[in-house]
Image (cartoon, rainbow, N blue to C red):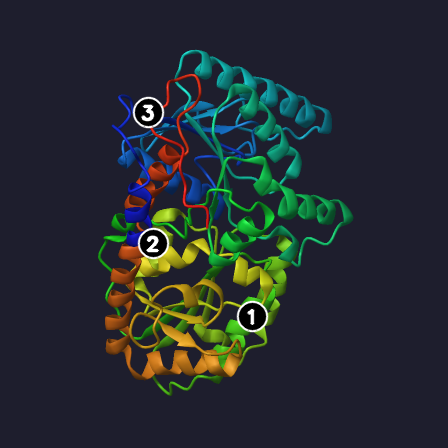
Amino acid sequence: MVDQIKNQKELNIGSRPQTEPHIVYLGETGFPLGFAAIQRQALIAKGLIAAGCKVTVISFKGSHSKDKDFPPSGTKEGISYRYASGDIHRPESFLRRNFQKIKGRIGEWVYLRQQKKRLQLDYALISSMHFGSLLWYSIILKVLRVPAILSLVELNSAIVSRKKLGLRINDFLVDRYAVSLFDGVLPISDYLMQHSKDCAPGKPTFKAPIICDFSEFDIPADEKEGVRFVYCGAPRYFQLIKFVLEAFDMVQFGNQQVSLDFILGGGTSAEIEQIKIEVSRQSKKDRIRLFRNVPRSELIQLYRNATALLIPLRPSLQDRARFPHKLGEYLASGRAVITTAYGEINSYNFIDKRTALVAEEYKSDAFGRKMQWVIDHPSEAGKIGEAGRQMGLVNFSHLLLGEGIKQFLLSLGRSESKKPVVKRRMDKK
């Protein structure tokens, strides 16, 4: 990451802009509340602000339930946000939901046009899994002559749960044509970097991996005896949860205090019930706890209190293309990470028994052996966790990534309403 940013700075020719750029972040809905997608959006925004940019996050419609209550426009941690529909809530009525969408799209266009007229709109970052939304943004931003950059974090067609015909058509269009619609791309992985180049040869790209505010995890741990394993994930990934349970069933710890915590975010009642039933079948069920939708502060504390954090990656196209957001948070906690040698794990310094514990195969017995090693060597696991945090700081800090993205944006040239001061030049690999 450091070398990538150093190379990016060499692209800027001439003096720096007299005014710092204003960047709008479009596509996702729900800011400032949400899981990985919203958290990534917030961290990129914070990194850009630290690099001297102004960022406004726009949600074109409301997505929250009635129990959530905050203003439809405001500031969160220095990040300006606005709901273009004027309402943060998702209406229960079908007609009202669709009316809100129309109202939001109009409000979105009006805001962007006003900002453009005031010479206060320089770049747009777009993140969405919906081809219709991506097409909409590409059109209006071309009309406004604002450089638009696509944030690419998944290969949609590789997500096995997206089986409906409508989703399959959408995912084909996104995976094949989305990159071509925009002026630049921020792929999260090496696979998506190559995918972008295959879809649109010569398209400017900048790899934006997982991202974390490491300072958020600078809190003391509750020092208690015993070994704690923690897995955090969505309930819909039942096979991964089952995999972890199988691995835990293989470990031996006698009279030692050993526990396994599952932190589950979101999910349906049926998915949670399925997990509870599976846990009830385990021989070590009295050592297993389930947490659901815990507050952010409690989540961070659970990470810090762990001995090791679990994130098995599968030998699948989906896991090769993506880069799980929680891995950055795992590293930031300073606790040992247990994972498997697939995807982006092989692109960074995830070295077994040095910066992480890396199982060579996606097999429960291989993963279980890494868990057993932690039980047998808890103090060494602590040293691995700290080394992993230092490796993460070099590669995944939101401050470093924010500066890198800013330099990438500047290399594309400013919005055409202002006289560009940066030549458009990229190394088109």
Vertical relation: 101 (above or below) 206? above
Residue located beneath label 2 in the image: 300
Residue located beneath label 1 in the image: 315
Vertical relation: 367 (above or below) 2? below
Q: Amino acid type of disc 3?
A: Val
Q: Residue 47 at what x, y percent from top left?
A: 32, 40
Residue 21: quadrant of the picture: top left
Q: Is residue 50 left or right of residue 193?
A: left
Residue located beneath label 3 in the image: 421
For the point 41% across and 48% down, which residue is it? 208
For the point 60% across and 71% down, which residue is it? 278
Q: Residue 188 at what x, y percent from top left?
A: 46, 51
Vertical relation: 153 (above or below) 274? above
Q: Which one is closest to the eye, mark 2 or mark 1?
A: 1
| Mark 3, secondary structure of its residue | loop
Q: Amino acid type of disc 1?
A: Pro
| Label 3 or label 1, whichever comes before in sequence order | 1
For the point 64% across and 25% down, which residue is it? 101
Residue 35 visible in the snapshot: no
Q: Is residue 264 left or right of residue 53?
A: right
Q: CA distance from mark 2 to mark 3?
A: 43 Å
Residue 244 visible in the snapshot: yes
Residue 391: quadrant of the picture: bottom left
| Label 2 or label 3, whichever comes before in sequence order | 2
Q: Residues within 10 Å of mark 2 (few under 14, many from 20)?
A: many
Q: CA distance from mark 3 to mark 1?
A: 46 Å
Q: CA distance from mark 2 to mark 1?
A: 29 Å
| Mark 2, secondary structure of its residue | helix
Single out the residue that lies furthest toward the right. Answer: 165
For the point 73% across and 46% down, which residue is it? 169
